[in-house]
Each structure stands twice: as C-alpha cells, then as structure tokens.
Image (spheres, grey):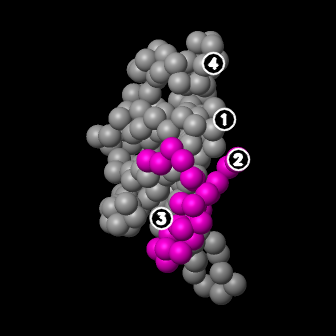
C-alpha cells in the first residue's frame, strides 16, 4: 500500500502545476457529471435527504475547483536580495501524506482533505471514513483515469492504522480530522 504511494510521489510531484490543476478540474467536472448518481449513493449510505446529498456533492465539486485553481498560483516567489540579483523561493511538495477521513459528510470531508494535499504535488494514502468507506472508493472511480492514489480500505480500526503510519519514515505528514 505505501510502496505504491511512494512510487507515485515522484511522478505526481514532477508534473507541472498547471497540469495538476487541469487534472483536479477534470475530477470536479466528472463528479459534477455524476452528481445525481453520487447523491443517490450518499442518500442510501448515510440516510440523509436527497437535498442534503446534492448539497454535499455540489460543495465537493466547488472545493475541487477551488483547490484546482490554487495548484499553480502559490508555487513560489522571486525576492530581491540585499546585494545584486534575486532569489527564487519555490514551494516543494512534502511527499507522501496520510489522510484519515471523518464520518461526518463523508464525500465533502474526503475532498476537503484530499484536494489541498494533491494540488501541491503530494501523493496521498487515504483511510476513508470508517462508517462510510465506499464514498472514497466511489470518488476513486471518478478520478481513476487521471490520478494514481493509494487507498487503504479498512472500515474498522482507523486508530491502529493511523498510529502505525507514524513509523514510516517516508510518510511525512498525517492529517486526521474528527473522531
């Protein structure tokens, strides 16, 4: 599981920021095209109303467009030095980021944690929501052709996996939101 994410780090991080933005836009467009299907799945899984599910899908699409727009905006800066010349400051990807998703608003939570990590060139290893893990897998199908993402599918015991991730030297960041 982590081997594939480390292999994807170099390929994904080396892509031009504009290309990463286009790929995230593509994910947003695909999610928008499958809006009613994804909302229907959310209704069945979570028991929320169709109106709430549609709102969650719409917000998820907006988040993808928002973070896609940032992919090529804040990559660095040029700063003047005290003497002659200039210094170029470039923001590099962290590497591999582990993300543990909460149960509340499973699609929106997943997209909100996933998108900012990948637009900056990082590879991600995701533990989907324990209660609704198939939401992340459904999203994976939306972006299957555009991005290599490694998912850890485990509907139980997120705490065990999250603690074990801390022992991987190559895993440079762990994001967990909620319980």
3 vs 1, front mark: 1
Q: Which residue is mark 2?
A: 178
Mark 3 or mark 1: whose residue is earlier in sequence: 3
Number of residues whose C-alpha sits closer than 10 Å to that of mark 2, classed few (under 14), some (14–19) or many (20 or more): few
- Secondary structure at badge 2 equals loop
**How far across and how far down the image is residue 93, in percent?**
50, 65
Q: Is residue 159 magenta?
A: yes
Q: Which residue is mark 1?
A: 104
Q: Taking the image as drawn, is residue 39 in sight?
A: no
Q: Give the vertical position of 125 relative to 140 (above or below).
A: below
Mark 3 or mark 2: whose residue is earlier in sequence: 3
The magenta region covers 153-179
Q: Distance between the Cα atoms at labels 4 and 3?
A: 33 Å
4 vs 3, front mark: 4
Mark 1 or mark 4: whose residue is earlier in sequence: 4
Q: Which residue is mark 3?
A: 96
Q: Is residue 111 magenta?
A: no
């Amino acid at each position: 599981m982590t081997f594939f994410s480390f292999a994807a780090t170099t390929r994904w991080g080396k892509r031009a920021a504009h290309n990463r933005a286009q790929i995230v836009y593509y994910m947003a467009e695909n999610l928008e095209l499958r809006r009613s299907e994804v909302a229907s799945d959310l209704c069945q899984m979570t028991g929320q109303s169709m109106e709430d599910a549609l709102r969650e899908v719409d917000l998820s699409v907006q988040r993808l467009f928002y973070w896609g727009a940032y992919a090529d905006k804040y990559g660095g800066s040029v700063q003047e030095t005290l003497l002659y010349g200039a210094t170029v400051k470039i923001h590099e990807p962290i590497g591999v980021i582990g993300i543990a998703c909460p149960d509340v608003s499973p699609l929106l939570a997943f997209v909100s944690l996933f998108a900012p990590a990948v637009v900056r060139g990082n590879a991600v290893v995701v533990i989907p929501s324990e209660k609704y893990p198939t939401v992340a897998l459904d999203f994976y199908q939306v972006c299957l052709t555009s991005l290599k993402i490694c998912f850890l599918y485990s509907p139980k015991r997120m705490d065990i996996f999250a603690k074990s991730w801390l022992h991987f030297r190559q895993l440079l960041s762990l994001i967990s939101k909620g319980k």
